[in-house]
């Protein structure tokens, strides 16, 4: 008979009864001895996270720039997770269920927007002390941010090209490009709910950006006309609006951060920096949710 694995026993989560017994034995003091690394580190991988800040200069400000960039990447991944959960629930016609991940998304975007505040100290002189060491590195090359844009309906096929030599990243991004956006899934949901929408909106090439359609706008005008408390579609519209508004806030804060730290200089990734971001902001997330308000 094989002896029980001590490793397995060591990592088995304690039951509530075992935790209570341990707390009583410790006199209410926290547990200070563990067979292996602390359970917190085993779960959060904090010791790994804190090895990832590898600066290129000795300038102390670079640490802020690098770590806030990494924090934003984590938020991008979290928002992508929530938007995909939203898509899953919309595909199941669970309108009420989709409200929770959308509301979490709005809160995550609040956290993402707040991260810009940690870089308010940076002047052009501060950034210039390490900017050249970044080479062609740029936030423009964030694959996870591209996932967010694509999931929110801002599709640009050419923007997957920088990732062609990162096979897994590239194919994952291609799948998001060619898949439906959250807005495409909302339109399909409205069609299944009986709203009169053209069939070509449901079968179009999803790798291209959705163009606002009067039938979708009319559907939202009708939805908002019903103010009954069980109108979950109206709640969905407001949750989507919150997400779109906070994403616009992030784009605006990015634009202002660039203006503050480098003005209208060419970006390190080769774009024309400030002007590129200005053009990007002109693209509207969930467009008919906004135009419908004029007709309400």
Image (tube, rainbow, N blue to C red):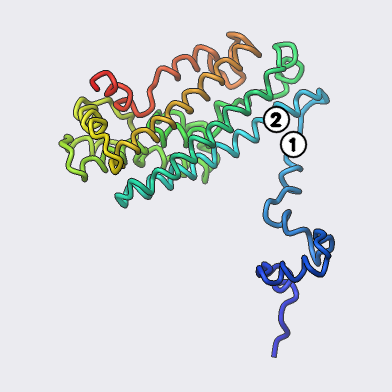
Residue 287 vs residue 290, the one in the foreground: 290
Asked whether the viewer can see residue 275, the reply is yes
Q: Which residue is mark 1?
A: 53
* Quadrant occupied by the C terminus: top left
> In the rendered image, is residue 206 in sight?
no
Badge 2 marks a residue whose secondary structure is helix
Q: Position of residue 234 (x, y in %)?
A: 30, 36
* Residue 124 drawn at (x, y percent): 70, 11
Residue 186, image quadrant: top left
Local packing at callout 2 (Cα closer than 10 Å; few below 14, some 14-19, many 20+) is some
Disc 2/disc 1 C-alpha distance (Å): 7 Å
Percent across and percent down for residue 203 are 23, 40
Residue found 38% across the figure and 27% down from its top: 285
Q: Which residue is mark 2?
A: 66
Tag of residue 198: none
**Is there CB contact under 8 Å for labels 2 and 1?**
yes
Task: Compare residues 243 and 285 and report the one nearer the observer.
Answer: 243
| Relative vertical location of residue 77 with respect to residue 238 in this rendering, above or below | below
Please tell me in which quadrant of the rendered image residue 213 appears.
top left
Give the quarter of the figure containing the N terminus: bottom right
Residue 24 shown left or right of residue 171 in the figure: right
**Figure check: 256 above or below 16:** above
The residue sitting at 71% across, 74% down in the picture is 9
**Residue 133 versus residue 48: which sits nearer the camera?**
48
The residue sitting at 71% across, 81% down in the picture is: 4
């Amino acid at each position: 008979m094989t002896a029980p694995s001590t490793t397995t026993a060591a990592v088995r989560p304690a039951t509530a009864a075992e935790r209570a017994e341990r707390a009583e034995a410790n006199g209410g003091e926290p547990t200070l001895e563990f067979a292996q690394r602390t359970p917190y580190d085993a779960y959060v991988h904090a010791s790994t996270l804190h090895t990832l800040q590898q600066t290129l200069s000795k300038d102390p400000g670079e640490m802020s720039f690098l770590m806030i960039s990494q924090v934003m990447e984590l938020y991008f991944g979290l928002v992508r997770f929530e938007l995909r959960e939203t898509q899953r629930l919309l595909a199941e016609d669970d309108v009420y269920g989709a409200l929770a991940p959308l509301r979490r998304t709005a809160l995550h975007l609040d956290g993402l927007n707040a991260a810009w505040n940690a870089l308010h100290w940076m002047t052009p002189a501060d950034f210039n002390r390490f900017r050249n060491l970044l080479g062609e590195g740029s936030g423009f090359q964030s694959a996870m941010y591209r996932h967010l844009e694509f999931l929110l309906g801002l599709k640009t096929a050419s923007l997957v090209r920088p990732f062609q030599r990162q096979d897994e990243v590239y194919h994952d991004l291609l799948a998001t490009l060619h898949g439906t956006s959250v807005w495409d899934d909302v339109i399909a949901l409205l069609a299944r709910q009986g709203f009169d929408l053209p069939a070509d909106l449901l079968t179009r090439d999803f790798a291209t950006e959705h163009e606002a359609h009067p039938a979708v706008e009319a559907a939202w005008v009708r939805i908002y006309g019903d103010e009954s408390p069980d109108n979950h579609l109206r709640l969905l519209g407001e949750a989507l609006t919150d997400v779109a508004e906070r994403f616009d806030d992030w784009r605006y804060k990015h634009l202002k951060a660039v203006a503050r730290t480098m003005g209208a200089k060419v970006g390190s990734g080769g774009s024309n920096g400030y002007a590129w971001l200005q053009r990007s902001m002109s693209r509207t997330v969930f467009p008919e949710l906004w135009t419908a308000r004029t007709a309400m």
